[in-house]
Amino acid sequence: MKFSRWLILIVVFLLSLGLLGITAYNSIPDVKALRGCLKTRMHSYYLCPTSPNYVVIDAVSSYVINAIIVSEDGTFYDHNGFDWFEIKGSIEKNLSELDYARGGSTITQQLAKNVFLSGEKSLLRKVREAILTVQIEKKFSKRQILEKYLNVIEFGPNIFGVKAAANHYFNKSPIELDILEASFLAFLLPNPKRYRESFVLKNLTPFARKSLARIVSRLAKYKKISDEEKVAALERLGGSQWVNDPVIYEENIPEPPDELPQDGTENVEEESES
């Protein structure tokens, strides 16, 4: 009797899972839209490749790219869109706290979520995110994924994309950012509205200083910067203050046209080879 009950429960679960998958798949947008104008559904933000605020990956400092990878997704060049070690840790932590306490999302997952999905936390949204992640990894190179990601991620209130962030925080272009500036932008990503407190206060908080030191050390560990660069950056970090006044960056970005134009355990080694 108990066996029959468990069998029924398993069948119901599998049927529900299958129905959920079908529902999610049928509502998936075409990821080819990433080749044209980017619209983030979470923030109603539009950015086209012809926009003055769009930046190609060759115009972004390698410090920025590598700092973000070692901070956000160390296995980016190795995985197929999912970091199973991080997912395992996320599940264990969330179950222990009975909450969505840890995300474990890769850069590709974050791109899918930011461009195509809402901010709701539901099983259906996670299934959609997984399907989109697989499709993005199949249709785009890692370099293309990085470029799109760098143009849509949020670095603060109404600050989207690395070009706007470099301009706002340092009054520079993305290619001009140094090691500490790149590390600061990477540090912001998990919670930009909260972590930008150091910029507002014009002085690094102890938490920010410790986080930047960790990112700099990881850059050296994975040979993205030399030991000499690491020492110099950490010495400068000891007295770093943010003295720039905020740059007001506003751009009227048009609605995308009906027909869109076409156009790193941890491995963070490929960016320097790309």
Image (spheres, helix red, strand yellow):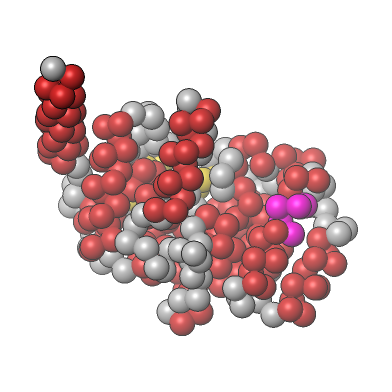
Location of the C terminus (image quadrant): bottom left
Q: Position of residue 225 (x, y in %)?
A: 66, 76
On the image, which quarter does residue 122 sit in?
Answer: top left
Q: Which residue is depicted at the point 57% across and 57% down?
A: 71
Residue span colored magenta: 209-213
Q: Is residue 152 visible?
A: no
Q: Which residue is depicted at the point 70% across and 59% down?
A: 214
State whether residue 2 is above or below residue 142: above
Q: Position of residue 113 (x, y in %)?
A: 36, 43
Is residue 259 or residue 211 the one in the foreground? 211
State whether residue 160 is above or below residue 32: above
Q: Position of residue 207 (x, y in %)?
A: 75, 45
Is residue 196 or residue 218 the one in the foreground? 218
Identify the residue at the far top of this view.
1
Q: Is residue 210 magenta?
A: yes
Q: How many marks?
A: 0
Q: Is residue 268 visible?
A: yes
Q: Which residue is depicted at the point 16% across and 41% down?
A: 25
Is residue 27 or residue 244 the one in the foreground? 27
Q: Position of residue 29 (x, y in %)?
A: 20, 44
Q: Is residue 33 magenta?
A: no
Q: Is residue 167 left or right of residue 11?
A: right
Q: Is residue 99 left or right of residue 221?
A: left
Q: Would you say the magenta stretch is mainly helix, strand or loop?
A: helix
